Each structure stands twice: as C-alpha cells, then as structure tokens.
Amino acid sequence: MSETREVNSVRVKIYGQEYVLCTEGDPECLLELCAVLDERMRNVAESTGSVDTLKVAVLAALNIADEARRAKEEVMRLDEAINKRSSACTSILDRLL
C-alpha cells in the first residue's frame, strides 16, 4: 500500500531571490535551512567582496559541505570511541560472570 504524503509549498527568500519550494517535511525546518543558507551567502559575500550570486552560492555550499564532512568525521570518531568502551565493558562483564 502506498503512503500519500502531504506536500507543502513554502515561499522563501535567499540572498534577495524569492523561491517557492515544496517539502514533505516540516515547513518550519525548511524556513530555518533557507535562513541559514541566506546568512552563509551574505557572510561569504561580505568576506570575499564578491557580487556574483553564483560564486557566492558555490562558496557557501563548499563551506557547508566542509562543515558536514567535519561533522561526519567527528561522528565516526565518537562512534569508534563508543565501540571501544562498549567492548571494554563487555570484557569486564565477561570476566565477572
């Protein structure tokens, strides 16, 4: 049986351009994401002095992608640490039982 999902249209403004975006998720979450992107683009434009929207968007995307990569690496590092501690705890319990 297929599940019908509600699609919401959301009007947003990113770096001076208006868009109507559709989402099956929470419209408020989409608004927050667009606000973050708008802020990133404005920060990039301010720090580089660029007025080219495409260049600003690409640089903002690279910044966001780098942040996501670093977050993924941190999650993997934490997961490894948890696995080591879990193995140590299991070993201790095995010795006690």
Image (spheres, helix red, strand yellow):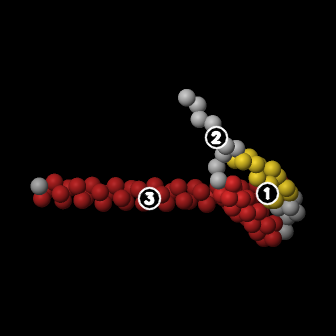
For the residue pair 7 and 82, the one nearer the viewer reads as 7
From this viewpoint, is residue 90 visible?
A: yes
How many angstroms separate mark 3 from mark 1 (CA)?
36 Å
Residue closest to the eye, 89 or 50: 89
Q: Quadrant of residue 42?
A: bottom right
Q: Label 1 near label 3: C-beta < 8 Å?
A: no
The crowd level at tag 2 (other Cα within 10 Å; few <14, some 14-19, many 20+) is few
Give the vertical position of 51 relative to 19 (above or below): below
Residue 92's disc number? none
Q: Residue at x 46, y 55 (%)?
A: 76
- Residue on which disc 1 sits: 12
Which quarter of the figure is the C terminus placed in?
bottom left
Outermost residue to the bottom: 47
In the displayed structure image, the side of residue 78 where residue 91 appears, left or right: left
The residue that mark 3 highlights is: 77
For the residues labelled 2 and 3, the Cα–Cα distance comes to 36 Å
Element type where label 3 sits in the image: helix
Disc 2 secondary structure class? loop
Q: Are the residues at dot 2 and dot 3 in contact (C-beta closer than 8 Å)?
A: no
Q: Which amino acid is tagged 2?
A: Arg
Does the rendering let one see residue 44?
Answer: no
Neighbours of disc 3 within 10 Å: few (<14), some (14-19), many (20+)? few
Instruction: Answer with mark 3 or mark 1, whichever residue precedes in sequence.
Output: 1
